[in-house]
Image (cartoon, rainbow, N blue to C red):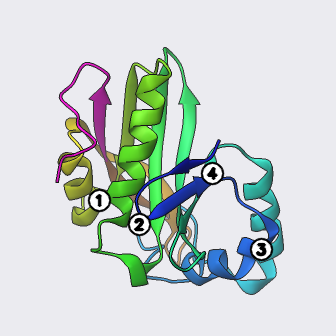
Amino acid sequence: MKLETERLVLRRFEKKDKDDLFAYLSDEEVMRFEPSLPLAKEGLADELRRRIASPVYIAIEEKASGRVIGNLYLGDRDCASKELGYLLNRNYWKQGYACEACRAIIEYCFARGTHRIYAECDPKNIASIRLLQRLGFRREAHFRKNIYFRFDGSGKPLWKDTAVYALLQEDPFSVHKS
């Protein structure tokens, strides 16, 4: 799959994306709400191979620079559903890139028969929630302390809440929304 928007190319990861991938996956602020810790240089080769091999990771390339500025995650789920995730290099935040990329992938999925697209995020991630709402997603759930990714100094889980947002094919959605 390769999609183009006004400013972006959505495509599979390639070997040449190594430095761009590291630039955002190693950033603590970018990884703040993610399940994994910031990427160490030693893990870069394995992470890049994993992303190249997996169709669920979609590179977001900025046309003007040719650089990968982030990625989408698009996982197949039961009942004609998809799970959507997104991560962007912080140098490209607040410029509409995540919205542009998500709109393109949503339109692509719905045109191919997807019934429902949902996203899970940390309820403290206000920027992510605003993006989902701007795209027309509706809040479906707030799970309290339902998941953990890390442990405290004594080995106890650091429980987190999860907010679930979804968009149905029949919901109002326009690729021209602002």
Tag 4 and tag 3, C-beta contact below 8 Å: no
Give the percent coordinates (x, y) of residue 141.
Answer: 24, 35
**Considering the numbered disc 1 on the image, is that residue within a helix, a strand or a loop?**
helix
Measured Cα–Cα span from mark 2 to mark 3 = 27 Å
Which residue in the structure is indicated by mark 3? 16
Compute the Cα span from label 1 to label 2.
10 Å
Q: Mark 2 or mark 4, which is nearer the start of the sequence?
A: 2
Residue 33 - label: 2
Tag in front: 1 or 3: 3
| Residue 72 vs residue 107, the one in the foreground | 107
Q: Which segment did they paint magenta?
A: 163-178
Amino acid at the residue labelled 3: Lys
Q: Which residue is mark 1?
A: 128
Badge 4 or badge 3: first in the primary sequence: 3
The relative height of residue 122 versus residue 153 in the rendered view (above or below) is above
The first of marks 2 and 3 along the sequence is 3
Asked if residue 167 is among those painted magenta in the image, a careful observer would answer yes
Give the spatial CA distance, label 4 vs label 2.
18 Å
Q: Which mark is residue 57?
A: 4
**Labels 4 and 1: the sequence-earlier one:** 4
Q: Nearer the viewer, mark 2 or mark 3?
A: 3
Instruction: Give the quarter of the figure containing the C terminus.
Output: bottom left
